[in-house]
Every structure is written in structure tokens, then in C-alpha cells.
């Protein structure tokens, strides 16, 4: 083992900064999770604050508001998974079928761009388009229709989240799938063409099976963040009128943790959700390894 490490010592030296970064910014802050079991006071600090056991968790589970945001988080993330996860796969397959290189590169550049725009800017664009005085409502009323409350309707808020998320990240998500497709042996397509397979059959029997390993890994990672994520998007798009359908755990933690100063309660929520994410990751990874032989470890 030591001999092998000495052989690749430069690789380990290059890896060292990443390990130090991970330890400093990901492992040391874990000590702060202990305030979930304390009655935390800023003046007393983490060590000086008294232990209260699972009191914050008991109080949390008795709160109706928590279960509402818990349900919202699951439903919104499931919608993202069902509609958002396959979107870059379909786009990557379509781009892979394009033979004109200049057209393919132009489309790739256009769909990549939204990824580099912040949610603050995107929310401004959406507000200018969909608000009561926005461009879309002006067009609707110009043709004799009634103005639609896109941004204050609980029924429209979730589709708005899903569609805006797909628009922003679909291009960036195709990068991994296009990279995987570039590694497919061209002889497979030539052999399929000789056997009389059309483009659709080649996609079904060659392209999709080639993507299955990377699809499995990304799907497992998506399940691992099922209970968190999307704070920037929701925080910049929601308002008090759509709390019923759009308030998720991340925004709830922000409100009670920072604006109300309930740090212990907010930490208890975060700890509880990370435990759920961890369990989901283990379960989905085990299921994937049994069904397809693919897993992240």
C-alpha cells in the first residue's frame, strides 16, 4: 500500500488541497449541528448553552406549519424529478442526432446561457413577463381576455417553478449526457444501419442503453437531495399569497432561523432533513445496484 502511494505521491499531493477544503468547510461546521439539542444563546455560545435533548424535535413535529412545508418540499421535488430530470436526457439525444455542427453548437450555446444567470435576474424577467402589468397579461387583455394572476395563484406556482427550473438548467444538464454519448462506439451505429435499424431504433437500442449508467448515478444523487435544494429559486419567486403551495423547508428554515432568531429549531429541521436525505441515498443506491448493477459506491 505504502509502495503504491509513493508511486503516485504527486497525485496525492494534488488531492491534498481538496481534502483540506472539504474538512474545513464541510466537516468542522458539523460541530454546529449540536445546537439542535441545546437551548442556544448567542451570548453563551455553543459550549455554554444548556442541553435540552430532543425538545426542539418534539416541538417541531407538533407544528402544523412544518408538515405543510414538508409536504410542499416532497411534492415540488417529485415534480422536478418527473419533469426536470428527463428533460436534459431528451435534449442531449436530440442534439446528438443533429448532423450540422454549426447548428448544433449554436443550439448548445443558447441553451447553456440561462445556467449562468442568477435566480435574482431570472425572477426579475419572470415578474416583468407574468405580473398583472406584465407583457403576457397585456397580450391577453389586448385580445379581450381577463388578466391572469400567474404569480399569486397557488395552482400556477408549482408549474412555474418546474418550467423555470427546466429552462435554466436543461442546457447545463446535457453536458454530462453529451459527454457520455461521445464515448459510444460509432461501429455500433454503422452495424445497426447495415442491419436496417432506423434512427429511432438506434436511439432505443444503442443510445439509451449507453446512457443508463450515468442516468442511474445522477438519479441516485437527485434522490440524495430530495428534501433540500431550490432555495434561491423559491425565495426569489414566491410571496405570501403562495405560501400554501410554494413554501418549502429551506425557506421555512430561513424565516424561523434568521428572521425570528430560532437557531436551534432551524438546525433541528436541517438535521432531520439531512437524515432523511441520507436514508434515501442509501436505499436508492442499494435498489439501483440490485436492479442494474450501478451505484455511486
Image (spheres, rainbow, N blue to C red):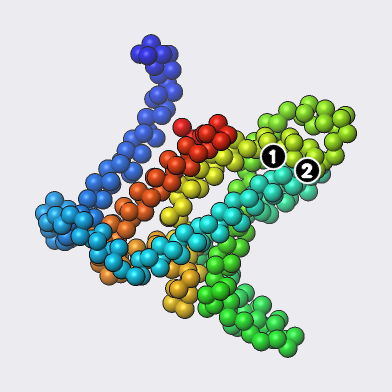
Residue 62 is left or right of residue 152, and the answer is: left
The one nearer the camera, 294 or 231, is 294
Q: Report helix, strand or loop for mark 1.
A: helix
Q: Residues within 10 Å of mark 1 (few under 14, many from 20)?
A: some
| Above-or-below relation of 135 to 258 | below
| Above-or-below relation of 189 to 178 | above
| Circle 2 residue | 97
The one nearer the camera, 278 or 64, is 64
Residue 155 is left or right of residue 67, and the answer is: right
Q: Residues within 10 Å of mark 2 (few under 14, many from 20)?
A: few
Q: Earlier in the sequence, mark 2 or mark 1?
A: 2
The one nearer the camera, 50 or 21, is 50
Residue sitting at x 54%, y 71%: 157
Residue 265 is left or right of residue 48, and the answer is: right
Q: Which mark is residue 208?
A: 1
Question: Is residue 124 in view?
Answer: no
The one nearer the camera, 246 or 126, is 246
Q: Nearer the viewer, mark 2 or mark 1?
A: 1
Mark 2 and mark 1: Cα distance apart in space: 13 Å
Q: Which mark is residue 2?
A: none
Residue sitting at x 26%, y 59%: 57
Q: Report helix, strand or loop for mark 2.
A: helix
Amino acid at each position: 500500500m505504502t509502495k503504491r502511494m509513493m508511486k503516485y505521491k504527486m497525485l496525492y499531493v494534488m488531492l491534498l488541497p481538496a481534502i483540506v477544503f472539504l474538512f474545513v468547510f464541510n466537516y468542522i461546521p458539523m460541530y454546529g449541528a449540536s445546537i439542535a439539542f441545546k437551548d442556544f444563546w448567542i451570548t453563551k455560545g455553543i459550549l455554554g448553552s444548556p442541553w435540552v435533548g430532543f425538545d426542539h424535535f418534539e416541538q417541531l413535529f407538533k407544528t402544523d406549519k412544518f408538515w405543510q412545508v414538508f409536504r410542499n418540499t416532497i411534492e415540488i421535488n417529485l415534480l422536478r424529478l418527473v419533469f426536470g430530470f428527463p428533460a436534459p436526457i431528451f435534449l442531449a439525444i436530440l442534439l446528438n442526432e443533429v448532423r450540422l455542427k454549426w447548428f448544433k453548437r449554436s443550439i448548445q450555446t443558447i441553451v447553456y446561457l440561462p445556467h449562468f444567470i442568477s435566480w435574482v435576474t431570472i425572477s426579475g424577467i419572470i415578474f416583468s413577463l407574468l405580473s398583472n402589468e406584465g407583457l403576457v397579461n397585456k397580450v391577453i387583455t389586448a385580445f379581450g381576455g381577463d388578466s391572469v394572476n400567474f404569480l399569486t395563484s397557488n395552482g400556477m406556482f408549482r408549474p412555474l417553478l418546474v418550467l423555470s427550473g427546466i429552462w435554466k438548467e436543461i442546457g447545463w444538464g446535457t453536458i454530462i449526457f453529451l459527454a457520455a454519448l461521445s464515448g459510444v462506439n460509432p461501429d455500433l451505429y454503422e452495424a445497426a444501419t447495415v442491419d436496417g435499424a432506423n434512427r429511432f431504433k438506434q436511439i432505443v437500442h444503442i443510445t439509451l442503453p449507453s446512457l443508463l449508467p450515468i442516468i442511474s448515478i445522477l438519479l441516485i444523487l437527485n434522490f440524495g437531495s430530495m428534501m433540500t435544494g431550490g432555495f434561491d429559486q423559491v425565495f426569489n419567486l414566491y410571496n405570501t399569497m403562495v405560501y400554501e403551495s410554494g413554501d418549502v423547508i429551506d425557506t421555512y428554515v430561513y424565516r424561523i432561523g434568521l428572521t425570528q432568531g430560532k437557531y436551534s429549531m432551524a438546525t433541528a429541521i436541517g438535521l432531520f432533513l439531512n437524515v432523511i436525505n441520507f436514508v434515501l441515498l442509501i436505499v436508492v443506491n442499494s435498489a439501483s445496484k440490485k436492479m442494474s448493477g450501478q451505484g455511486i459506491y
